[in-house]
Amino acid sequence: MALADQMNSGGGDEENRRDADVVLGDDWVAPDSTVEKELRDSRARRSVFSLNRSPLTRKIITFNLIALNVLVAGVLWLNSSRDTLAVQRANALQSEVELIADIFEAQLPAGAPVSLATSDGIDVARTVEGIDLREGVDLLVFDAGNFLVGEAAGQMPPAIEPAGEDEKPTLITDFLGTIWRNVAGMFTYFAAEPELVLEDKLRRMIEAGDVAQTRVVAGNAPGGATLFYALSPIRQSDLIVGSIALVSTAREIDAAVSAERERVLQMFVIATLVSIGLSLVLASTIANPISDLADAAEIGRDRHRRNVAPGRIRIPDLTARPDEIGRLSGALRGMVSALYDRIDSNEQFAADVAHEIKNPLASLRSAVGSLRMVKKEEHRQKLLDVIEHDVRRLDRLVSDISNASRLDSELVKEEEQEFNLLEMLGNITEFLGQDAGKKGIEFITDLPPRDISIHGLEPRLAQVFVNLITNAISFCEDGDAIRVWARRRDNRVLVVVEDTGPGIPDEALSKIFKRFYTSRPQSDFGNNSGLGLAISKQIIEAHGGVIWAENIRPTEADVTSEPLGARFVVGLPI
C-alpha cells in the first residue's frame, strides 16, 4: 500500500534543454539548430537604425519624450525666481521714487504758490541735476498739468558689478524667444496699437491711476525687454503740485532668468538625447525579441500556406529572460511543442488504428475466401461464427476509436463543475456491485463519511471509474473480491480499485495504458479494443491528476512473489 498512500506530485520530469546561452536584447543569438535560416537573415539585416520602422519603438520614444517635455514645461512654468526678483526690484524702485519725491517736497516753500513748469518756488532743473541715478534708470518730472518739466538719465555705475555669468550667450533661449515673438507677431500685427513715446506713456499712466498714490507698474519696451514704471506725487501740504516718474530696465532680471532657462533647456536637450538613446536600447530589448518571435511564427505559417519545404516552426528560446518576453517565449514554445505532440499523437493514433483494423479485416478476408470453398455445413457454420465475431470486433473497435477521437475536443468544450466525488462513486459501486454479485464476486466499498468535492467533468470521471471497476470484474472469478476505497491526502484525493484476480504481468505494467494494448486470456481475444485504460489516463491527466497500476504482493520486500491481485490508483487534485 506504499504506492497508494503516497501521491506522485508531478507527471514527470521536464527537460530544460538549452542549446546556447540566452542574453538580453540584440546580443541574443540562437544556435542554428533552433532558428530558421530566414530568421537568422532577418536578424542580420536588423540594426539600431532600423528600429524607426518599428511602431513599438516609436511609441516608446514618443511617450518618454512627452513625459520629459511635460516635466521641463512644468519646471519653466512654475519657476518663481523671476517673480521674486521682480518683486524685489519693484519694492526698491518704489522706495527710490518716494525718496526723490521727498527731495522735491523738502525744497517747496511752506505757504507760497508753486509752479514746477516755471520753476516758481523750486528750481526743477537744478534739483534733477543734483540727483544721482544708476545706469538704466530714467527720471521724469511732471507738473500738475502732467506736462514734462524735467528729466535725467542715470549715469552712476552699479555698486556691485555682475559676475559676468549673465553675459554668456543663451542660444536656445534666444532661438525659442525669437520663434515665440514671430508667431505672436503674426496674430497681433493687425491689432497692435502704435508704440507711444516714453513721455506720452507715462502721462497716460498718471492720468489713468490715482495721482495721490505711489504706484509701480511693469511693462515691456519695444524690443521686448521688461520695464518698471514707478510713479509718486509731489505734495505741498495737501496739494499735489506734480509727479515723479522713474523708469528702470530689468536687464539683470531678464539676463538672470534667461541664463537659468538656458541651463534648464540645455539639460533638457541632454536629457532628450539620453532618453532617445535609452529608449532605443529599451526598444531593442523588447521589439527585437518580439520581432524574432513574430518572424518565426510567420515563417512557419507562410511555409505551410505555400506548402514549400514545410518544416517544424522553431520558436527562439528566450525563457532565460526574467520578464514577460521570456514568459511569452516559453508559452509559445510550449504551445508549438504541444501542437506537434498532438500532431505526432494523431499520426501515431492513425497508424495504430490502421494496424488494428487490418487484423479483423484480414481475418474476414480469409474467412470469406474459405467460405466459398468449404462444403461441409459444420465448417461453414464455424466460418460464419468467425465472420460474425470479426464484425462485432470491428464495430466495437470503430465505436471505441470514435469515442477516443472525440475525447480531446469534448474535454476542451465541456465546462467543469464542482460535484461530490463520493456520491458519484457510491452510485457507480452500487450499480456495478450487483453485476459483481451475479458472478459470485465479493464487492467491498470503503468510502469516508465526509463529502469530498472536486472540480471537473463528472461524466468523464465516472467513465474512468466504471472502466476500472468493469475491468476488475472481467478479470475476477467466483470467490474473488473487489474493493473500492477513497481517502483524502492533503490537497489530493486517492481512489483505489483493488481486486484478487490474477494480477498484471510485470512486462505489461509499463504498457498497460498504451492505446490498443490489451493483456487478456486467449478465450477473451477480440472482445476489447485496448482503448479503455488509455482513455482513462487521458481523462485523468486532463484533470491534473495521475493514474497508475501495480500488483498486490504478500510482502513489499519480495517482488518476485506471485501477486495477490491488481490495484489501480487514481489521484485527483481537490
Image: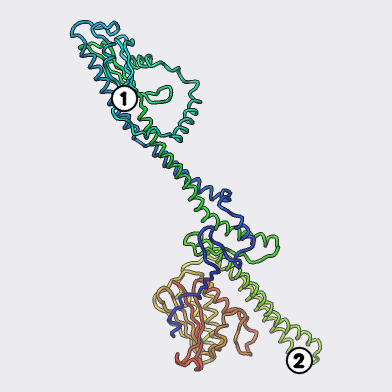
Q: Is residue 140 above or below residue 39?
A: above
Q: Quadrant of the N terminus?
A: bottom left
Residue 54 in view of the camera: no
In this view, the residue in front, 216 or 536, is 216
Could you tell me how far apart the alpha carbons at marks 1 and 2 are, in whole angstroms? 139 Å
Q: Which mark is residue 157?
A: 1
Helix or strand or loop: what does disc 2 sit on? helix
Residue lying farthest to the left in this orientation: 110
Q: Nearer the viewer, mark 1 or mark 2?
A: 1
Q: Position of residue 435 (x, y in %)?
A: 54, 84
Count of numbered circles on the image: 2
Viewer-closest of 273 and 183 = 273
Tell me residue 239's x, y (percent). Answer: 23, 10
Dot 1 alpha-carbon crowd within 10 angstroms: few under 14, some 14 to 19, many 20 or more: few
The secondary element bearing badge 1 is classed as loop
Using residue 203 as the reference point, say whether residue 384 is left or right of it. right
Taking depth in this image into account, of 413 and 558 the one nearest to the observer is 558
110 vs 519, left or right, is: left
Q: Residue at x 43, y 74 (%)?
A: 492
Residue occupying image coordinates x 58% and y 68%:
337
> Residue 243 in the image: x percent, y percent?
29, 14
Q: Residue at x 45, y 90 (%)?
A: 556
Q: Circle 2 sits on which residue?
A: 379
Three-letter amino acid code at disc 1? Pro
